[in-house]
């Protein structure tokens, strides 16, 4: 007779702390087989990249040790999920699978549907648990924030003391091996460095953020270069689940409660801003949960078809390579390519420039960024792409001026010069707009525009009115406003601005989602 077991399926939750499915699996009394599935078809999708895999690989190596310490080492199998489960079910009598609900791509949603169907067919119970503040089958957005906040306030789930291991007759069961970081299955090698994964790294970052770095979080959050030091840098850990959003939120709340005097004053704003971003994390992921089509379709359907036909491959290539002729845009793209992370404002500027100045389709640029970001989180990613491209119908249209951003956030051009070495000897007064240098100055600084560094690929001052005009034409169409109201009813934040809340009036739908996201 096959041994009865349950499976704990790890997905984007690579930890044993605050892990409800693991605790429930351990409590059921049967042997627990922790499992990670490497799904080759997933890694062929346009959003997946070896940079993600490197981070996951570090995290799985860590997790492997943790599971072994709990009494049952983790299995890592490669293949289609249903095929892997079938294979395991032929070796064991699998009575149940425990997992978190995955707030993922259309691809993972379809895979989960197949697993669910197979479980129903074979009589295996599939126990799925909520992922942080995201609510499955949410009826209305009106009470969502309350549900999310209550979940965040609940105590973290205790790590089980031990897992019941596989029985003696199965100790020789082939657990499988973790594919190499460099395995061709994961595509081309990362184009640069990769943030280290693993829970221990996440804990270190959280600790240093809450004790030192975070003090200057709000002051430097938008500056490229400085933000990489003073931002929490926890995004990849939250994405791949080496830390839970709840434990990060609770650790921050604990710090807030312990501070007093000058420290309390200095830390008040940064810690509040940080916690509000953790809340936005859930808010954006909830959008994808409620409307999975936002990966492929504009939230406001009137905007579909607006950019697709005018896609210019040369402009796309220039943007992707960091050769647009706009120094801050190029520096950000090259920095992101090299390190896999950039701060919120610069992500927003990269998308704004691609979507408005270059009129590129957000789906194409979105895949490039998804592959580059170590922290690729579908719910945040597609919501933000759509917001910064103006296709939600419920957000104020915000077009970033890449030259103004450059003067504001890299005034001496140090970041630009680091990432665009062609401009190293350009005088600081011209580093934001090198095309304004005279020919003699270009020669003197060893940077001939159009030869050593590109001319601007478009004129921002002309591109923006043209983009606004195209947007306005759509916004004036009959039925636009009614459709916006429907988007807001389903996906919009219910948070009010402070001023409007005091006066009792509702903030206009168009502004609701911009709150708390930008520092001015
Ligand atoms: C076009 C675009 C795409 C983005 N794609 C992603 C993505 O794929 N994955 C991702 O984690 N973030 C994404 N963001 C949001 C944000 O830029 C990153 O979360 C942030 O820069 C990560 O750095 P950090 O961990 O130091 O953040 P911190 O500022 O320290 O914030 C703490 C955490 O809050 C969450 N968070 C921060 N800002 C936001 C935000 N604006 N919306 C929702 N959650 C937020 C993240 O989980 C982050 O780790 C995107 C933003 C834009 C404009």
Image: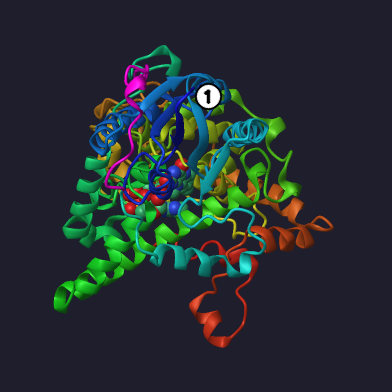
Magenta includes 520? no
| Residue 44 visible in this rendered orientation of the protein | yes
Identify the secondary structure beneath mark 1: helix
Question: x, y (%) of residue 112?
Answer: 59, 35
**Of residues 388 and 100, which is closer to you in this image?**
100
Would the CB of label 1 be found within 8 Å of ligand 1? no
Quadrant in which the C terminus appears: bottom left
Q: In the figure, 263 relative to 308: above or below?
A: below
Applied colour scheme:
rainbow
Mostly what secondary structure, the magenta segment? loop
Question: x, y (%) of residue 481?
Answer: 76, 62
Question: x, y (%) of residue 401?
Answer: 47, 50
What residue sits 36% from the left and 31% below the top? Answer: 56
Q: In the figure, 111 relative to 151: above or below?
A: above
What residue sits 49% from the left and 78% below the top? Answer: 498
Crowdedness of circle 1 by 10 Å Cα count: few (<14), some, many (20+)?
some
The region drawn magenta spans 160-178
Question: x, y (%) of residue 279?
Answer: 44, 61
Q: Quadrant of residue 68?
A: top left
Q: Residue furthest front?
A: 1
**Of residues 226 and 10, which is closer to you in this image?**
10
Total marks placed? 1
Mark 1 = which residue?
89
Specify whether 214 is left or right of 191. left
Q: Residue furthest bottom?
A: 503
Specify whether 421 is left or right of 47. left
**Of residues 186 and 477, which is closer to you in this image?**
186
Q: Residue furthest top?
A: 184
Q: In the figure, 210 relative to 258: above or below?
A: above
């Amino acid at each position: 007779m096959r041994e009865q077991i349950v499976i704990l399926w790890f997905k984007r939750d690579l930890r044993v702390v605050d892990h409800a499915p693991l605790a429930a699996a351990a409590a059921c009394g049967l042997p627990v087989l922790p499992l990670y599935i490497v799904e080759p078809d997933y890694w062929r999708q346009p959003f997946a990249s070896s940079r993600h895999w490197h981070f996951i690989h570090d995290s799985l190596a860590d997790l492997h040790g943790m599971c072994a310490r709990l009494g049952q080492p983790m299995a890592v199998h490669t293949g289609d999920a249903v095929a892997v489960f079938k294979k395991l079910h032929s070796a064991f009598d699998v009575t149940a699978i425990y997992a978190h609900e995955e707030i993922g791509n259309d691809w993972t949603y379809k895979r989960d549907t197949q697993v669910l169907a197979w479980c129903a067919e074979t009589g295996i119970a599939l126990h799925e648990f909520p992922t942080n503040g995201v609510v499955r089958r949410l009826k209305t957005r009106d009470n969502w924030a309350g549900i999310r906040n209550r979940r965040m306030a609940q105590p973290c789930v205790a790590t089980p003391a031990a897992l019941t291991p596989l029985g003696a007759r199965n100790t020789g069961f082939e657990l499988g091996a973790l594919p190499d970081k460099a395995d061709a299955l994961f595509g081309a090698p990362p184009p640069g460095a990769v943030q280290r994964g693993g829970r221990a790294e996440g804990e270190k970052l959280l600790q240093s953020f809450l004790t030192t770095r975070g003090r200057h979080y709000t002051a430097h959050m938008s500056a490229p270069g400085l933000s990489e030091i003073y931002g929490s840098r926890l995004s990849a850990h939250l994405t791949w689940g080496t830390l839970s959003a709840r434990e990060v939120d609770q650790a921050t709340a604990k710090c807030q409660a312990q501070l007093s005097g000058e420290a309390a004053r200095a830390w008040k704003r940064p810690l509040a801003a940080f916690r509000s971003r953790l809340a936005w994390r859930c808010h954006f992921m909830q959008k994808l949960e409620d409307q999975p089509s936002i990966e492929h379709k504009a939230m406001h359907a009137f905007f579909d078809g607006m950019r697709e036909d005018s896609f210019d491959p040369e402009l796309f290539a220039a943007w992707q390579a960091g050769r647009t002729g706009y120094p801050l845009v190029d520096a950000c793209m090259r920095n992101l390519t090299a390190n896999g992370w950039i701060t919120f404002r610069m992500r927003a500027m990269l998308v704004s420039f691609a979507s408005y100045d270059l009129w590129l389709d957000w789906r194409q640029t979105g895949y490039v960024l998804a592959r580059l970001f170590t922290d690729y989180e579908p719910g945040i990613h597609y919501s933000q792409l759509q917001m910064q491209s103006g296709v939600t119908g419920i957000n104020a249209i915000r077009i970033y001026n890449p030259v103004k951003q450059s003067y504001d956030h890299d005034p001496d051009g140090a970041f630009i010069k680091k990432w665009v070495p062609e401009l190293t000897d350009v005088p600081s007064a011209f580093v934001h707009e090198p095309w304004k240098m005279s020919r003699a100055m270009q020669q003197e600084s060893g940077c001939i525009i159009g030869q050593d560094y590109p001319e601007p690929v478009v004129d921002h001052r002309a591109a923006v009115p043209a983009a606004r005009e195209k947007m306005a034409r759509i916004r004036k169409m009959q039925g636009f406003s009614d459709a916006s109201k429907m988007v807001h009813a389903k996906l919009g934040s219910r948070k009010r601005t402070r001023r409007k809340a005091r006066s009792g009036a509702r903030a206009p739908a168009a502004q609701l989602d911009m709150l708390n996201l930008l520092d001015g």
